[in-house]
Image: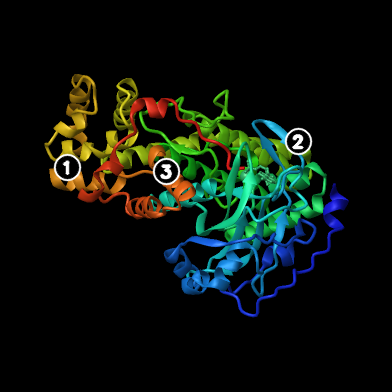
């Protein structure tokens, strides 16, 4: 396997475009020879632009108009390789639902290149659904348009919520059909990420006992994401700690908005701490710790409340991969790494309780057991009464301003809610009611990417070529904390039987 990757020459693919919308600077292709296979995107018959993300383009210093031009759309569909790109399929392995696959890799994705954004940060420009690569195995390397639109919406929703995430720069329809259970219109997503380094990237080289490549990879990851660690003697242990810290913060943020990733395999956990690979993900409606929507997650491994535990499990796999770098003495390496993994639950809890205190405007209250108990009681209350997770927090703002009604109607029986409200009033009484309400509205979104809205936007776009519901949903989700009188429907949950029967699928 090792020789297979190494034997592939690391030449840059020829480009047939003289100009490029992107000012590429491709460190992965340059510095990590042997960790990828050069590939070309597969041409498609009839590219049609679905959308360019103008705000993101501006952030990247990319001319959105150039992307929207006929030549730009050819580039976004994979029909032309822009000047300066060095398209590659990255090698990675991964634990999927607990079982190890030593070779996964970019089977339907490729890294076009990297750009430096307006803030000086290096960001990957990658395609998803751009055709076969040496890692495609039996797959066609393609993506259906539905999952492309889904990833676009979910990524933007998470970004607007302030949660680190990859984002869609563009979506195009390809004009060809991909064969799944039925024939579906195809699409290509252009994805922007801090990087596509995953836990699984490290597992790939660790599984091959390739210490040299492992170390190069770790040094690259440190230089790119954690440069402050580069000069430390214990930098590989510090890398593990830093990734654990970012994951603890990230998962706490997911939990705070009711996000269920759905397929937290180690190849879908990023080293940079961004949410990555939106497949069968979903936002929870009624609060239920056991909530799971993915059709392939039959045993609920990736259920809502399991996510912190799975993050720890994945980090343990990351730790195992790093062991040879952490200390030459194997026993000592294990002891050092184990301490980091054992510390993860406390690290996570600290983040989660901070998120909860923020959500309940308790961040100024005297921290301690009483405040933590109020948070936990609130969650129990939502669970017991099957209250919509998002609105349960959001409408508390009304109650804060002494207008209890909208909040209380979320509960089938209001007395428990009223009792909790009384207990909560004491620690938040330092703030004037309107100030308190405003604070709650700043931390609790009114709009999330509700499943029925996402599905309706996809269905209209794919079946009827109608992009209006997609555009409108994106517009509402771009400002999730601002309640709008013209978007009242977007705040409301789907009927409970819709949610009970709702299943998500991997975007393959
Ligand atoms: P995912 O579940 O999307 O994270 O994908 C897991 C692995 O399957 C990755 O190695 C993907 O590249 C590969 N894969 C998924 N879909 C396809 C496809 N249609 N063709 C080829 N490879 C695929
Ligand atoms: Mg993946």
**Mark seen at residue 430:** 1
Residue closest to the far left: 402
Residue 500 rendering spot, x and y as whole percentages: 42, 25
Residue 180 rendering spot, x and y as whole percentages: 63, 40
Going from the N terminus, do you reach mark 1 or mark 2 first?
A: 2
Residue 429 rendering spot, x and y as whole percentages: 16, 38
Q: Nearer the viewer, mark 2 or mark 3?
A: 3
Q: Is residue 430 left or right of residue 109?
A: left
Front-lying residue, 381 or 317: 381
Front-lying residue, 459 or 427: 459
Asked which quadrant contains residue 254, the reply is top left
- Identify the residue position indicated by label 2 in the image: 331
Does the image show residue 249? Answer: yes
Q: Residue at x 82, y 54 (%)?
A: 5
**Mark seen at residue 304:** none
- Identify the residue position indicated by label 3 in the image: 454
Q: Is residue 357 left or right of residue 39?
A: left
Residue 63 rendering spot, x and y as whole percentages: 49, 74
Which corner quadrant holds the C terminus?
top right
The CA distance from mark 1 to mark 3 is 40 Å
């Amino acid at each position: 396997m090792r020789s297979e990757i190494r034997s592939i020459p690391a030449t840059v693919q020829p480009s047939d475009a003289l100009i490029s919308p992107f000012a590429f600077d491709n460190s992965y292709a340059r510095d990590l020879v042997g960790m990828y296979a050069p590939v070309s995107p597969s041409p498609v018959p009839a590219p049609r632009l679905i959308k360019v993300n103008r705000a993101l383009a501006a952030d990247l210093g990319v001319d959105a108009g150039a992307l929207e031009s006929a030549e730009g759309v050819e580039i976004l569909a994979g029909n032309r390789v822009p000047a300066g790109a060095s398209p590659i399929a990255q090698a990675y392995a991964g634990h999927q639902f607990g079982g190890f696959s030593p070779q996964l890799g970019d089977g339907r994705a490729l890294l076009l290149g990297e750009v430096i954004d307006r803030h000086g940060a290096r960001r990957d420009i990658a395609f998803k659904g751009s055709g076969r690569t040496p890692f495609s195995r039996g797959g066609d390397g393609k993506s259906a348009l539905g999952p492309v639109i889904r990833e676009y919406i979910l990524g933007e929703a998470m970004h607007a919520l302030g949660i680190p995430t990859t984002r869609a720069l563009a979506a195009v329809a390809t004009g060809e059909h991909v064969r799944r259970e039925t024939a579906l219109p195809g699409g290509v997503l252009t994805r922007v990420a801090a990087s596509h380094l995953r836990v699984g990237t490290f597992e790939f080289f660790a599984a091959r006992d390739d210490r040299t490549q492992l170390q190069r990879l770790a040094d690259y990851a440190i230089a790119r994401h954690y440069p402050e660690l580069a000069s430390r003697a214990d930098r590989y242990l510090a890398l593990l700690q830093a990734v654990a810290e970012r994951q603890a913060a990230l998962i706490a943020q997911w939990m705070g908005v009711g996000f269920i990733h759905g397929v937290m395999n180690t190849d879908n956990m990023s080293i940079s701490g961004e949410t990555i690979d939106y497949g069968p993900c979903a936002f929870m409606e009624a609060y239920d710790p056991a909530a799971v929507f993915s059709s392939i997650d039959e045993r609920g491994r990736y259920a809502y409340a399991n996510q912190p535990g799975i993050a720890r499990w994945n980090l343990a796999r990351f730790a195992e991969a790093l062991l040879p770098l952490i200390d030459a003495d194997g026993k000592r390496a294990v002891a050092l790494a184990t301490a980091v993994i054992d510390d993860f639950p406390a690290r996570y809890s600290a983040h989660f309780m901070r998120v909860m205190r923020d959500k309940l405007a308790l961040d100024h209250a005297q921290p301690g057991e009483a405040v933590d108990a109020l948070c936990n009681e609130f969650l129990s209350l939502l669970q017991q009464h099957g209250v919509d997770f998002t609105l349960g927090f959001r409408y508390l703002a009304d109650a804060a301003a002494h207008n209890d009604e909208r909040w209380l109607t979320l509960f089938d029986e209001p007395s428990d809610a009223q009792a909790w409200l009384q207990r909560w009033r004491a620690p938040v009484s330092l703030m004037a009611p309107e100030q308190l309400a405003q604070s709650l509205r700043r931390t609790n979104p009114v709009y999330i990417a509700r499943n029925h809205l996402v599905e309706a936007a996809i269905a209209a776009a794919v079946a009827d070529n109608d992009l209006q519901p997609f555009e409108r949903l994106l517009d509402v989700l771009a400002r999730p904390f601002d309640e709008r009188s013209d978007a009242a429907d977007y705040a409301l949950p789907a009927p409970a039987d819709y949610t009970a029967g709702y299943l998500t699928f991997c975007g393959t």
